Each structure stands twice: as C-alpha cells, then as structure tokens.
Image (cartoon, rainbow, N blue to C red):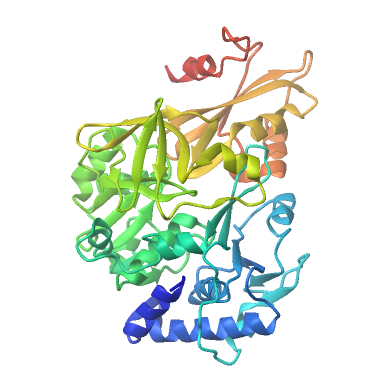
Amino acid sequence: MVHPQALLDELERAPEVPAFEHGSRVTSRGELRELIGRFTAGLRAAGLGPGDGVGLATGVTPEGFAALVAVHVLGGRAVAVRPGLPEAQLRHVLADVAALVVDEPVAATVPVLEVAALASAEYAEPVPQGRLDDVATVVFTSGSTGVPKGVAYSYRALTEGRVWRAPVPGSAHARLGAGFGRFLLFGTLASAVMVEQLALSLLAGGTAVIPEGPPDFPWVLPRLRITAALLTVPRLHQVLGVLRGSDVDLGAARRLIVAGSPVPPHTLAEAAERIGPAMHHAYGQTETGMLTICRAGEGAGSVGKPCDTVEIDVRDGEVWVRTPSAFAGYWRDEPATAEVLRDGWVRTRDLGFVDPDGYLHLSGRARDVVIVNAIIHYTGPIERAIAAHPDVDQAYVVAVPDERTGEAAHAFVVPTPGREPDLAELRKAVAAELGEAAVPARFSFVGAVPVAPSGKPDKAALRRSIVD
C-alpha cells in the first residue's frame, strides 16, 4: 500500500461523515473522494503522471485539498505555492513543474489548470501510482541565500510515517487525534504544519471547518464549535488579551496547539490557567513535522515529549531527530541536504537537552535565523538586501523576543559616511527582495559594530545591547 491509500480507505469507510464544512456548504467524505477521482482524471487528461511536478496555488477549499491528493494518486510531485511570493522566488518555485493548478486564471510560465475544469472531469477510481522512493511533495521555505529552499518528502515518508495513516489505537497520536473532531482550517494549504494537522483530523474521523474570512480569535472558536486549532504566538497573545477582559466560552476546545516560534514560559503558564487542559504547545520543523508536544501546564520550560515514532539524540548540545515522517532532502540541493541529513537522522540546528522526565528543552540555535510568526527567515539575505542600499555601509540582523510574533528581526545599520539612510527605502528594499514578511520590525543606526575575539562582528553583543 502506498500513500494516499490510507486516506482513500478512510473516506470510503464513512462516506456520509462531513470532511469539510465551510459556511452552509458541507462536503462529505464520499463527496471528497469523488472530487479526488475527478481531479485525478483531469490531471491525467492534461498529460500528467508519475514523477511530474504540479504546482498548487489554490485557496483553502475542498477542491484545493482534492487537487493535492490527486497529484499523489498519480504519483506526481506536489509543489506547494505560498501566496504572496516575490516574482523572483515564484519563478524559482515553478522552475521544475509541468503545470500549475489555480482557482482563477493567472499568467504563468507553465500551463495553467483551473480547479473548475478539473472538478468537472469524468470520475475515475483513484488508484495510487506513487513509488516509495519518489518525491511526493516539495514545500518551499526561505533559504540561507534568499532563494527558497525546497523541502522534499518521499512517498515512503507519507506512507510509513504517522501523519497520513489512521492513528494506532491507544497511541499518543490517537489520543491527540481524539480532540480533532472539528479542526479549524485556515491560512494556506502550502503550510506543511497545517496540512499535517488536517490529515490528523480526517484520519481520526474529524471534520475540517473553514471559517468565512480570516479567523477572529478567540470568538471563532465557540462560534464554529471548534475542538482543535493551531495558534501562532501572536494569535495566542490575541486570545489571552481578549480573555483577560471578556468571558469567552472555550468549553468545546480539546486541542489548541501553539507552535512555530518560541513561547515565553509566563505566557504558557497564563494560557494553561485561562484555557485549561486544552492548551498545548509543540515543536517541530518543516523537515520533520511535529516532533514534541505536551499540555501547556506540563514540562515547565520545555517544548514537550517526543511524539510517536520520534527519536531524539543530543550530540554536543545539538538536537538530532529520527522519524519515518522526515524529509528525503532539499530539492536539487545535495550540499544542503548533506549538512542536515545523515544516516536517517535530521540535524535540527537547535541546541537543547532532554531532562530526566523525557521533556525536550531548547536553549538556542546553531543557525542564524529569526522565527517570526512561525516562519523562518535567514538573517543573511536580509542583511545583504539592506547593505545593498548606497546609503548603508554595513547591516546586521539579530533575533529578539517579541510578545506578538514570538521573535522579531532587529536590524543594526552602519550608514555610509556622510549619508542618512531613509528607513522607508530600506524597508522597501527588503520587501522587494524577500517579501514583506522579511522586513525587520525595528532598525537601529549605529556608528560601529562590536567585534568578537574571532575578529567577526559580535552579533551577540548587538543583541545584548537591546535585550539585556
């Protein structure tokens, strides 16, 4: 059996159970399976098959998910296209795809297939054609050079990992999935973590509930009777801010999971007190999926205990992990793959330790990144974008704690002698090169940068100058 057979079997097992709910529209599991069959036929009629790359730039809809699964049925390579990519990054992401699936007509460098046309194809029974060692999905993240880095998952990882199969009864994965009866699905299907939790909901028998417009936390939770949702650090702060002054009924919630960025211990403590046992925090990476999880009131200062099938090994203070769900490598980037993937173990490049009770604690990073709203931004490309401005002599970016976003980028700028850089122009330069999300939240102009004993700029000292 190869992915997505387990999902197809689950949809067929209970065809009348809702798979998606969006306003008054309810898509049953049987109807979703029908959509997958139609999309499979439509993609095949367009000449697509095993090994072909298919870009997916759809909204959060049953059709968008059906398109993803249909690519997997054909044995193709699904390439997630995140909204709002700068043109240069979009060209890079689409460089190896044979077609692009969209909701509405767009201009593109590859053939465009519209969702409506694919959905109207004649149904064909979906029979998975994937080969275990072929690449099934590529999710692009920001790269250390400013070029998006493709995280490639094989059909083996999707078949043998815990994410895309029914939870084993009695397992921690099954206990987690038991709270996913009504999972709040929003944002983008290009988010690996969102799709991972969507899979858990569907394979645990739950329903994905799509809100009308951006979710207004925490009010969206009782209004849609949500039992499970993912929260970024800013959304958790938004929820807590409302709960401090308003009475919001979160009695239906079973699994509210905050992940993606560091969460201050006092924030988790308040969340545990105000929300109760439904509040969880988790740790993972795009390369591995979710690695650890626990209730917010447990494992003080930690990021939780390992999930089912996850092994953790701390080597010289650095956290390495092994899981069947891990990625196969970076798309067409063997040197980067060799840096983090060795003998089945993934180097997280995070520093930490496991305490005697089995909880993982993170203490820092072995890489120069800022995690803003659960999105990793390498500081190097941001620094280069700022330093390219003629009024800038040097630029250095550090990560600092932020109550709203978990972390924020703070740029230290050394102006060119006799020049006064315009902040608006610097922000515009970063946005044009890397996108709005990469623009530092704050800038400081300095006359010089401290130097470490190694002779390199002392970014730790820069950070201490504003944090300590």
Q: Nearer the viewer, residue 449 or 304?
A: 304
Q: Is residue 179 left or right of residue 156?
A: left
- Give the quadrant of residue 135: bottom right
Outermost residue toward the front in this view: 343
Q: Is residue 128 left or right of residue 296?
A: right
Outermost residue toward the bottom in this view: 122
Residue 258 visible to the viewer:
yes
The residue that appears at 63% across and 9% down in the rendered structure is 455
Residue 184 visible to the viewer:
no
Q: Nearer the viewer, residue 132 or 260?
A: 132
Identify whether 458 is placed above or below 203: above
Q: Is residue 210 left or right of residue 458?
A: left
Identify whether 418 is placed above or below 187: above
Q: Position of residue 269 (x, y in %)?
A: 23, 38
The residue that appears at 43% across and 55% down in the rendered structure is 325
In what quadrant of the picture does the C terminus appear? top left
Q: Position of residue 196 (x, y in %)?
A: 42, 60
Q: Position of residue 298 (x, y in %)?
A: 20, 41
Identify whether 359 is placed above or below 3: above
Count of numbered marks: 0
Q: Is residue 212 left or right of residue 226?
A: right
In what quadrant of the picture does the N terminus appear? bottom left
Q: Nearer the viewer, residue 71 or 337?
A: 337
Q: Position of residue 18 (x, y in %)?
A: 35, 80
